[in-house]
Image (cartoon, grey):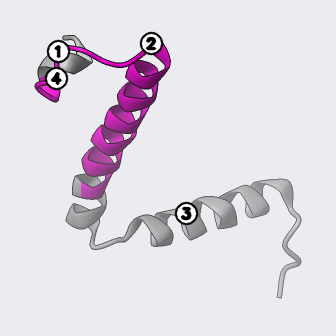
Amino acid sequence: MEIGKHIQQEKFQSNQEKAYINMLFTSNYFRDLYQKIFNKAGLLSQHYNILRIARENIRNRSVPAT
């Protein structure tokens, strides 16, 4: 579906504006989608990010074992 129909705007000042609005819309869509997943697990996106970074560090063995 066209971005204009989603946001109920038919005309844009330029293709650049349309692309920018489309990127913001898509970013917000995925943020909301992931937020629903995180909420089910009792996490915030910041928690997930820390867990993801920790997992990568363990895989790369860059975190010394204690």
Dot placed on the residue nearer the N-terminal end, 2 or 4: 4
Residue 66 vertical position relative to residue 35 in the rendered view, above or below: below
Residue 63 rendering spot, x and y as whole percentages: 84, 72
The residue labelled by disc 1 is 10
Is 20 colored magenta in this rendering? yes
Q: Amino acid at mark 3?
A: Asn
- Dot 2 falls on a residue whose secondary structure is helix
Residue 39 rendering spot, x and y as whole percentages: 23, 65
Q: Amino acid at mark 1?
A: Glu
The residue labelled by disc 2 is 15
In this view, the residue farthest toward the front is 13
Q: Contact, CB < 8 Å: mark 2 with mark 4?
A: no
Residue 26 vertical position relative to residue 36 in the rendered view, above or below: above
- Dot 3 falls on a residue whose secondary structure is helix
On residue 20, which mark appears? Answer: none
Front of the two marks 2 and 3 = 2
Dot placed on the residue nearer the N-terminal end, 3 or 4: 4
- Dot 4 falls on a residue whose secondary structure is loop
Q: Quadrant of residue 38?
A: bottom left
Q: Residue at x 37, y 70 (%)?
A: 44
The residue labelled by disc 4 is 9
Q: Residues within 10 Å of mark 4 (few under 14, many from 20)?
A: few
Dot placed on the residue nearer the N-terminal end, 2 or 3: 2
The answer for how far apart the CA atoms under marks 3 and 4 are is 35 Å
Q: Residues within 10 Å of mark 1 (few under 14, many from 20)?
A: few
The residue labelled by disc 3 is 49
Residue 11 rendering spot, x and y as whole percentages: 24, 14
Front of the two marks 3 and 4 = 4
Q: Quadrant of residue 55?
A: bottom right
Q: With 39 as the anchor, is 8 left or right in this view?
A: left
Q: Amino acid at mark 4?
A: Gln
